[in-house]
Amino acid sequence: MSAANCLVANDWVCGEYFRTRGQDLVDATLQHIGITVAAVVIGVLIAFPLAVLAHRRRAFAAPVLAVTTLFYTIPSLAMFSLLLPLFGLSAALVITGLVLYSLTILVRNTLAGLDAVPEEAREAATGMGYGPWRLLWEVEVPLALPALLAGVRITTVSTVALTTVGAIVDYGGLGSLILDGLDTDFRAQVLAASVLCVILAITADLLLLGLQRLCTPWTRLGAAAPGPAPARKAATA
Protein backbone atom coordinates (compact mmCIF):
# COMPACT_ATOMS: atom_id res chain seq x y z
CA MET A 1 0.00 0.00 0.00
CA SER A 2 1.38 3.42 -0.96
CA ALA A 3 2.16 6.05 1.63
CA ALA A 4 -0.74 8.23 0.45
CA ASN A 5 -3.20 5.36 0.72
CA CYS A 6 -2.45 4.89 4.42
CA LEU A 7 -4.53 8.00 5.09
CA VAL A 8 -7.43 6.55 3.13
CA ALA A 9 -7.05 3.24 4.96
CA ASN A 10 -6.91 5.14 8.28
CA ASP A 11 -3.80 3.27 9.44
CA TRP A 12 -2.38 3.93 12.90
CA VAL A 13 1.12 4.45 11.49
CA CYS A 14 1.12 6.68 8.43
CA GLY A 15 4.11 8.59 7.10
CA GLU A 16 1.89 10.65 4.83
CA TYR A 17 0.23 12.16 7.90
CA PHE A 18 3.52 13.70 8.99
CA ARG A 19 4.11 15.10 5.49
CA THR A 20 0.66 16.66 5.12
CA ARG A 21 -0.08 17.60 8.75
CA GLY A 22 3.41 18.26 10.06
CA GLN A 23 2.74 21.94 10.71
CA ASP A 24 -0.30 21.05 12.84
CA LEU A 25 1.93 18.86 14.99
CA VAL A 26 4.56 21.59 15.32
CA ASP A 27 1.99 24.23 16.31
CA ALA A 28 0.33 21.92 18.84
CA THR A 29 3.69 20.91 20.32
CA LEU A 30 4.78 24.54 20.73
CA GLN A 31 1.49 25.41 22.39
CA HIS A 32 1.85 22.40 24.68
CA ILE A 33 5.38 23.42 25.69
CA GLY A 34 4.36 27.05 26.20
CA ILE A 35 1.45 26.19 28.48
CA THR A 36 3.53 23.70 30.46
CA VAL A 37 6.48 26.06 30.97
CA ALA A 38 4.21 28.96 31.96
CA ALA A 39 2.30 26.83 34.47
CA VAL A 40 5.43 25.36 36.08
CA VAL A 41 7.28 28.70 36.31
CA ILE A 42 4.30 30.49 37.82
CA GLY A 43 3.73 27.54 40.15
CA VAL A 44 7.31 27.73 41.42
CA LEU A 45 7.06 31.50 41.94
CA ILE A 46 3.93 31.02 44.05
CA ALA A 47 4.91 27.80 45.85
CA PHE A 48 8.33 28.96 47.03
CA PRO A 49 7.17 31.89 49.21
CA LEU A 50 4.30 29.75 50.52
CA ALA A 51 6.76 27.03 51.55
CA VAL A 52 9.08 29.59 53.18
CA LEU A 53 6.12 31.04 55.07
CA ALA A 54 5.06 27.59 56.26
CA HIS A 55 8.67 26.83 57.26
CA ARG A 56 9.28 30.04 59.16
CA ARG A 57 5.80 30.36 60.68
CA ARG A 58 4.68 26.86 61.60
CA ALA A 59 1.14 28.03 62.36
CA PHE A 60 0.68 28.59 58.63
CA ALA A 61 1.98 25.15 57.62
CA ALA A 62 -1.24 23.21 58.10
CA PRO A 63 -3.50 25.78 56.35
CA VAL A 64 -1.10 26.15 53.40
CA LEU A 65 -0.80 22.39 52.93
CA ALA A 66 -4.54 21.91 53.35
CA VAL A 67 -5.48 24.52 50.74
CA THR A 68 -2.94 23.37 48.16
CA THR A 69 -4.01 19.76 48.67
CA LEU A 70 -7.65 20.78 48.27
CA PHE A 71 -6.86 22.22 44.82
CA TYR A 72 -5.39 18.88 43.77
CA THR A 73 -8.57 16.99 44.72
CA ILE A 74 -10.76 19.02 42.35
CA PRO A 75 -11.41 17.15 39.06
CA SER A 76 -9.94 18.93 36.05
CA LEU A 77 -13.31 19.47 34.33
CA ALA A 78 -14.73 20.99 37.50
CA MET A 79 -11.62 23.15 37.97
CA PHE A 80 -11.86 24.60 34.46
CA SER A 81 -15.59 25.18 34.91
CA LEU A 82 -15.00 27.10 38.13
CA LEU A 83 -12.34 29.26 36.49
CA LEU A 84 -14.34 29.83 33.30
CA PRO A 85 -16.23 32.95 34.54
CA LEU A 86 -12.89 34.58 35.42
CA PHE A 87 -10.81 33.78 32.35
CA GLY A 88 -13.23 32.72 29.63
CA LEU A 89 -12.14 30.25 26.95
CA SER A 90 -8.46 31.15 26.89
CA ALA A 91 -4.98 29.79 27.52
CA ALA A 92 -5.02 31.66 30.85
CA LEU A 93 -7.85 29.39 31.98
CA VAL A 94 -5.76 26.26 31.39
CA ILE A 95 -2.56 27.75 32.81
CA THR A 96 -4.30 28.90 35.99
CA GLY A 97 -5.81 25.47 36.55
CA LEU A 98 -2.43 23.80 36.02
CA VAL A 99 -0.75 26.25 38.41
CA LEU A 100 -3.24 25.38 41.14
CA TYR A 101 -2.63 21.67 40.58
CA SER A 102 1.15 22.18 40.72
CA LEU A 103 1.12 23.81 44.15
CA THR A 104 0.53 20.57 46.05
CA ILE A 105 3.77 18.92 44.91
CA LEU A 106 5.87 22.09 44.77
CA VAL A 107 4.93 23.38 48.22
CA ARG A 108 5.31 19.98 49.89
CA ASN A 109 8.69 19.22 48.32
CA THR A 110 10.09 22.68 49.00
CA LEU A 111 8.87 22.60 52.59
CA ALA A 112 10.29 19.11 53.10
CA GLY A 113 13.64 20.28 51.74
CA LEU A 114 13.75 23.32 54.02
CA ASP A 115 12.72 21.26 57.05
CA ALA A 116 15.49 18.74 56.31
CA VAL A 117 18.27 21.33 56.61
CA PRO A 118 20.40 20.33 59.63
CA GLU A 119 19.77 22.52 62.63
CA GLU A 120 23.52 22.75 63.32
CA ALA A 121 24.00 24.38 59.91
CA ARG A 122 21.43 27.03 60.78
CA GLU A 123 22.94 27.62 64.22
CA ALA A 124 26.44 27.90 62.80
CA ALA A 125 25.29 30.37 60.13
CA THR A 126 23.46 32.45 62.72
CA GLY A 127 26.57 32.45 64.87
CA MET A 128 28.57 33.76 61.91
CA GLY A 129 26.20 36.72 61.64
CA TYR A 130 23.89 35.49 58.88
CA GLY A 131 20.55 37.29 58.90
CA PRO A 132 17.27 35.54 58.05
CA TRP A 133 17.43 36.26 54.31
CA ARG A 134 21.12 35.44 53.93
CA LEU A 135 20.53 32.24 55.92
CA LEU A 136 17.68 31.34 53.57
CA TRP A 137 19.48 31.96 50.28
CA GLU A 138 23.02 30.86 51.18
CA VAL A 139 22.35 27.92 53.51
CA GLU A 140 18.78 26.66 53.51
CA VAL A 141 17.90 26.92 49.81
CA PRO A 142 21.12 25.28 48.55
CA LEU A 143 20.66 22.37 50.96
CA ALA A 144 16.95 22.10 50.05
CA LEU A 145 17.68 22.26 46.31
CA PRO A 146 17.59 18.48 45.66
CA ALA A 147 14.05 18.19 47.10
CA LEU A 148 12.92 21.38 45.38
CA LEU A 149 14.18 20.30 41.97
CA ALA A 150 12.70 16.83 42.45
CA GLY A 151 9.36 18.53 42.99
CA VAL A 152 9.83 20.57 39.81
CA ARG A 153 10.56 17.38 37.85
CA ILE A 154 7.44 15.62 39.11
CA THR A 155 5.33 18.71 38.54
CA THR A 156 6.62 19.23 35.00
CA VAL A 157 5.89 15.66 33.93
CA SER A 158 2.40 15.73 35.46
CA THR A 159 1.74 19.13 33.87
CA VAL A 160 2.69 17.80 30.43
CA ALA A 161 0.01 15.15 30.93
CA LEU A 162 -2.62 17.47 32.43
CA THR A 163 -2.18 20.04 29.66
CA THR A 164 -3.95 17.64 27.30
CA VAL A 165 -7.15 18.16 29.31
CA GLY A 166 -7.13 21.77 28.11
CA ALA A 167 -8.38 20.37 24.80
CA ILE A 168 -11.92 20.77 26.14
CA VAL A 169 -11.47 24.55 25.81
CA ASP A 170 -9.32 24.25 22.64
CA TYR A 171 -6.09 25.08 24.47
CA GLY A 172 -4.68 21.62 25.09
CA GLY A 173 -1.69 21.57 22.77
CA LEU A 174 -1.26 18.01 21.61
CA GLY A 175 -4.37 17.12 23.58
CA SER A 176 -6.45 19.09 21.08
CA LEU A 177 -5.13 16.88 18.27
CA ILE A 178 -5.81 13.75 20.33
CA LEU A 179 -9.38 14.82 21.09
CA ASP A 180 -10.04 15.82 17.49
CA GLY A 181 -8.58 12.51 16.29
CA LEU A 182 -10.79 10.55 18.68
CA ASP A 183 -13.89 12.47 17.59
CA THR A 184 -13.17 11.76 13.90
CA ASP A 185 -11.55 8.33 14.35
CA PHE A 186 -8.33 9.69 12.80
CA ARG A 187 -5.94 7.00 14.02
CA ALA A 188 -2.67 8.41 12.71
CA GLN A 189 -3.33 11.75 14.43
CA VAL A 190 -4.25 10.13 17.75
CA LEU A 191 -1.12 7.97 17.77
CA ALA A 192 1.26 10.71 16.58
CA ALA A 193 0.02 13.27 19.11
CA SER A 194 0.04 10.72 21.94
CA VAL A 195 3.59 9.59 21.19
CA LEU A 196 4.78 13.21 21.00
CA CYS A 197 3.18 13.90 24.38
CA VAL A 198 5.09 10.98 25.91
CA ILE A 199 8.32 12.15 24.26
CA LEU A 200 7.77 15.65 25.69
CA ALA A 201 7.34 14.27 29.21
CA ILE A 202 10.43 12.06 28.99
CA THR A 203 12.54 14.84 27.44
CA ALA A 204 11.48 17.35 30.09
CA ASP A 205 12.27 14.89 32.87
CA LEU A 206 15.73 14.11 31.46
CA LEU A 207 16.55 17.81 30.99
CA LEU A 208 15.50 18.62 34.55
CA LEU A 209 17.41 15.61 35.87
CA GLY A 210 20.51 16.97 34.14
CA LEU A 211 19.87 20.40 35.65
CA GLN A 212 19.42 18.85 39.08
CA ARG A 213 22.71 16.96 38.81
CA LEU A 214 24.45 20.11 37.56
CA CYS A 215 23.10 22.28 40.39
CA THR A 216 23.67 19.73 43.16
CA PRO A 217 27.04 18.07 42.45
CA TRP A 218 27.61 17.38 46.15
CA THR A 219 24.77 14.83 46.14
CA ARG A 220 26.99 12.55 44.01
CA LEU A 221 30.14 13.00 46.12
CA GLY A 222 28.91 11.43 49.34
CA ALA A 223 30.23 12.48 52.71
CA ALA A 224 33.24 14.24 51.22
CA ALA A 225 31.04 17.14 50.16
CA PRO A 226 27.92 17.49 52.34
CA GLY A 227 26.65 20.60 50.63
CA PRO A 228 27.43 23.73 48.60
CA ALA A 229 30.30 25.95 49.67
CA PRO A 230 28.34 28.49 51.78
CA ALA A 231 26.47 25.72 53.59
CA ARG A 232 29.69 23.73 54.24
CA LYS A 233 31.31 26.85 55.62
CA ALA A 234 28.40 27.42 58.00
CA ALA A 235 28.24 23.78 59.02
CA THR A 236 31.95 23.59 59.83
CA ALA A 237 32.21 26.95 61.58
Image (spheres, rainbow, N blue to C red):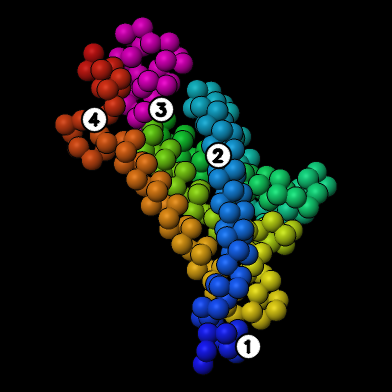
Q: Name the residue under label 2.
A: 41
Closer to the chain start, of discs 4 and 1, is 1
How busy is the neighbourhood of tag 2: few (under 14 within 10 Å), some, or many (20 plus)? some
Task: Give above or below for 17 relative to 107.
Answer: below
Q: What residue type is labelled 1?
A: Val
Q: Mark 1 points at which residue?
A: 8
Task: Give above or below for 108 relative to 167.
Answer: above
Q: Distance between the residues labelled 2 and 1?
A: 43 Å
> Quick one: 186 or 5, which is closer to the camera?
5
Q: Is residue 169 left or right of residue 191?
A: right
Closer to the chain start, of discs 2 and 1, is 1
Query: Residue at horizontal 59%, vertical 80%?
Result: 187
Q: Nearer the viewer, mark 2 or mark 3?
A: 2
Closer to the chain start, of discs 3 and 1, is 1
Do residues under tags 4 and 3 come within 8 Å of each other at their CB atoms? no
Give the image location of residue 220, x and y in percent: 23, 40
Task: Give above or below for 139 relative to 44.
Answer: above
Give the image location of residue 203, x and y in percent: 43, 55
Start-end of magenta stretch = 115-143
How busy is the neighbourhood of tag 4: few (under 14 within 10 Å), some, or many (20 plus)? some
Query: Residue at horizontal 67%, vertical 70%?
Result: 179
Closer to the chain start, of discs 4 and 2, is 2
Q: Distance between the residues labelled 3 and 1?
A: 57 Å
Q: Is the magenta stretch mostly helix, strand or loop?
A: helix
Q: In which quarter of the image is residue 76?
A: bottom right
Q: Can residue 101 be seen in this view?
A: no
Q: How far apart are marks 4 and 2 (CA)?
A: 28 Å
Closer to the chain start, of discs 2 and 3, is 2
